[in-house]
Image: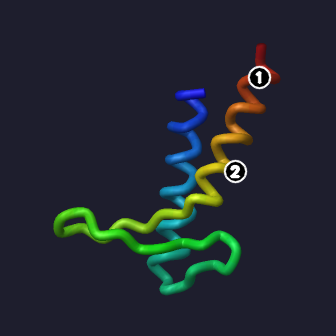
Amino acid sequence: MLKAFFLGAVLSGAIAGVVGSQGSSAGPLDVHSMTLGDFRVFWSWPVFLAGSGLAWALMLLQK
């Protein structure tokens, strides 16, 4: 499951970065901006959970 969390975070960061930098929240994806020090980071919990679930299911299929 930890590998799936990593892949979900990569997917969420990529999608939220593209959508958030355009100034959109993408409706149900709920992209929001967070400030970490001097950096602005975009994040989406729904995309993270869906991506982690998808990655976990794909890893289970590969067994």
Res 8 quadrant in image: top right
Amino acid type at circle 2 is Ala
- Out of 19 and 25, give the one closest to the viewer: 25
Residue 56, above or below 36: above
The number of callouts visible is 2
Q: Residue 52: where, in percent of width, then height?
A: 64, 42
Residue at 66% across, 47% down: 51
Label 2 residue SS: helix
Label 1 residue SS: helix
Query: In the rendering, which numbered label is found on residue 60?
Result: 1
Q: What residue does disc 2 label?
A: 50
As measured in the structure, the alpha-carbon distance from the residue carrying label 2 to the one carrying label 1 is 15 Å
Amino acid type at circle 1 is Leu
Q: Residue 38: where, in percent of width, then height?
A: 17, 69
Mark 1 surroundings within 10 Å by alpha-carbon count, few (fewer than 14), some (14 through 19), many (20 or more): few
Seen from this angle, which residue lies furthest top? Answer: 63
Residue at 50% across, 83% down: 22
Q: Residue 62: where, in percent of width, then height?
A: 77, 19
From the image, which quarter does the C terminus lie in? top right
First along the sequence among labels 2 and 1: 2
Q: Residue 15: where, in percent of width, then height?
A: 57, 63
